[in-house]
Amino acid sequence: MSQPLRGRVALVAGATRGAGRGIAVELGAAGAIVYVTGRSTRARRSDYDRPETVEDTADLVTAAGGHGIAVPTDHLDPAQVRALVDRIADEQGRLDVLVNDIWGGEHLFAWDSPVWEHDLDDGLRLLRLAVDTHAITSHHALPLLLRRPGGLVVEMTDGTDAYNRENYRVSFFYDLAKTSVIRMAFALGRELGPRGATALALTPGWLRSEMMLDTFGVREDNWRDALDRVPHFAISETPHYVGRAVAALAADPDVARWNGQSLDSGSLARTYGFTDLDGSRPDAWRYLVEVQDADKPADVTGYR
């Protein structure tokens, strides 16, 4: 099996579950050493109170062909993040890929709740988890990433720049958080580009994360059973799909062409030729505009 990232070192911040786990595993499949972080461990669950752990993710990375290293970290704590980066520097002497996927806000936003009705503490906590964590991690990790030319920073968000610019996303706080991350990638691109590194924003489509599958009462092996209730779920994708997008970007010697841009898994699949686990290429954001938001019946023909 080809492992184009053999010898490369990645940090996936926020890799306990969902997109972060999929990204970590696919970087491992490409041969990378992957440090995975999060607050959920085998010894202690986070406030999500879910069973997935960073240790489990590290084991999956190693099983895929890489080397997974779990480092429990609260990315709101600068001292913990500094210790994490110091450890990577001591053990590896380099950092080639930084994926900022910290989120943790699923239980903090209310759909279609205006700012004056939304719980203020929850909204501000959401912003801290979605924005402050990324800034803290970049502050401490980027000097190590810049030691060698060709480094890559991936800011994970929900929605492309084009889609979020035209559409209200869930609520004031959610909208602000996801759009802010896109702007972070733009700003980092301006700062990193002249120094030989690349930053970009990346979104999956409708993600079949562990939490989403639980919400619909299905598993990965029978996820289509949810289509009777949620027909547009037919366009959904596994976390491995966006993981393969990150692995393809990290292996691209011309990745700088994407500097500062907002990208999505579906469009990158067409560019790099990878597929989801089932061999399909879901193009969720085009589907959202042309089918779901246009109030057309669910039909993924031509979209996956």
Image: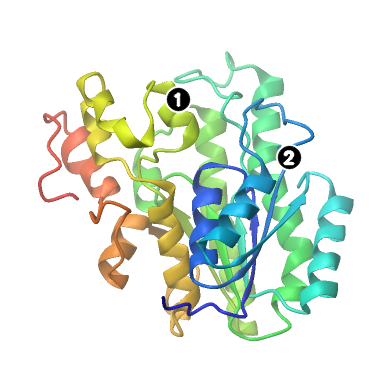
Residue at (46% x, 44% y) in the render: 158
Instruction: From the viewer's perspective, tell me whether residue 22 is left or right of residue 232.
Output: right
Q: Which dot marks residue 108?
A: none
Determine which residue is flagged by label 1.
214
Instruction: From the viewer's perspective, tell me whether residue 179 is left or right of residue 204.
Output: right
Q: Where residue 239 appears, x then y in whole percent?
A: 43, 48
Instruction: From the viewer's perspective, tell me whether residue 8 is left or right of residue 158.
Output: right
Which of pointers 1 and 2 lies earlier in the amino acid sequence?
Answer: 2
Q: Quadrant of the N terminus?
A: bottom left
Mark 2 crowdedness (10 Å alpha carbons): few <14, some 14-19, many ≥20: many
Residue at (59% x, 23% y) in the render: 107
Q: Which dot marks residue 39?
A: 2
What kind of element bears circle 2? loop
Q: Where residue 237 appears, x then y in whole percent?
A: 33, 45
Residue at the front extreme of this rendering: 63
What kind of element bears circle 1? helix
Nearer the observer, 2 or 198: 2
Q: Amino acid at mark 2?
A: Arg
Marks 1 and 2 sit apart, C-alpha to C-alpha, by 20 Å
